[in-house]
Amino acid sequence: MKTLVFEAKNDDEALLHAARELRVNPTYITLNHAEKKGMLGLKKTVEYTATVNVNLLDFGYDFLKDTLQAIEIEATIEAEYNTETGAYHYTIDSSENPLLIGKSGKTLHGFQTYMRNLMNLYSDEGVTVVLDIGDYKANREKQLEILATKTAKEVARSKIPATLRDLNAYERRIIHTKLADWRDVTTTSEGERPNRYLVIKPSE
């Protein structure tokens, strides 16, 4: 949990200060305090400890629900925490899946990045968020694994490197993982952001 220790004159001032410094909604802040005495035993200031208390899985779910309601899209949302990977998984299914996914999944990935950055404000540990809409990622992963296998076989046969462009970091990672145990080829990500690309090379 994120915590902050500071001094303030009263609870109202402390809550505003904690919300500003921690950059979170004050609803999720718990204050504990101890008075500090000045000269002659008079109260001078109060030392506060502000703690962020939030169930991140529920927080992410509520965020998705409120956002979809705000743009008037009816959807079913499922939320699950993976204890093995430490990732928060969310799935959305609606009649507007194509709109929420966007071209080449850009809207989906932007949505996921925003959720991760938002949820990281409420935790002192790195938060991993996995968002899928209408099984887009699951289907895309299968497509990429087929592409990786087909391309790797061709590279191993021809001994000519192959370049795969227009892949985001998540998609490149899928191909890296798929081909990690192959002996005939190796994979590398090259180029500068935002134009990184993946190269499949014959093993030396």
Image (tube, rainbow, N blue to C red):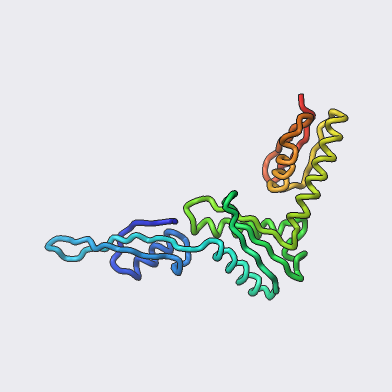
Residue 75 % position (x, y): 70, 71
Q: Residue at x 62, y 67 (%)?
A: 64
Give percent across and percent down for residue 28: 45, 66
In the displayed structure image, the side of residue 5 where residue 56 appears, left or right = right
Q: Please determine whether, in this image, residue 132 is positioned above or below residue 159.
A: below
User: From the image, which quarter does the N terminus lie in?
Assistant: bottom left
Task: Give the mark count.
Answer: 0
Residue at position x 70%, y 59% from top?
132
Q: Position of residue 25 (x, y in %)?
A: 47, 66
Q: Residue extending furthest top?
A: 204
Q: Nearer the viewer, residue 104 or 159?
A: 159
Extreme residue toward the left, this view = 40
In the image, 25 versus 88, the foreground residue is 88
Residue 161, quarter of the rendered image: top right
80 lies left or right of 44:
right
Q: Residue at x 38, y 57 (%)?
A: 4
Give coordinates of residue 54: x percent, y percent.
48, 63
Using the image as rendered, state which of residue 36 and residue 20 is in the foreground. Answer: 36
In this picture, is 180 found above or below 52?
Answer: above
Position above or below: 56 against 160: below
Kindly indicate the quadrant of the structure image that contains residue 196.
Answer: top right
Which quadrant is home to the C terminus?
top right
| Horizontal side of residue 45 vs 99, given as left or right | left
Q: Is residue 195 left or right of residue 87?
A: right
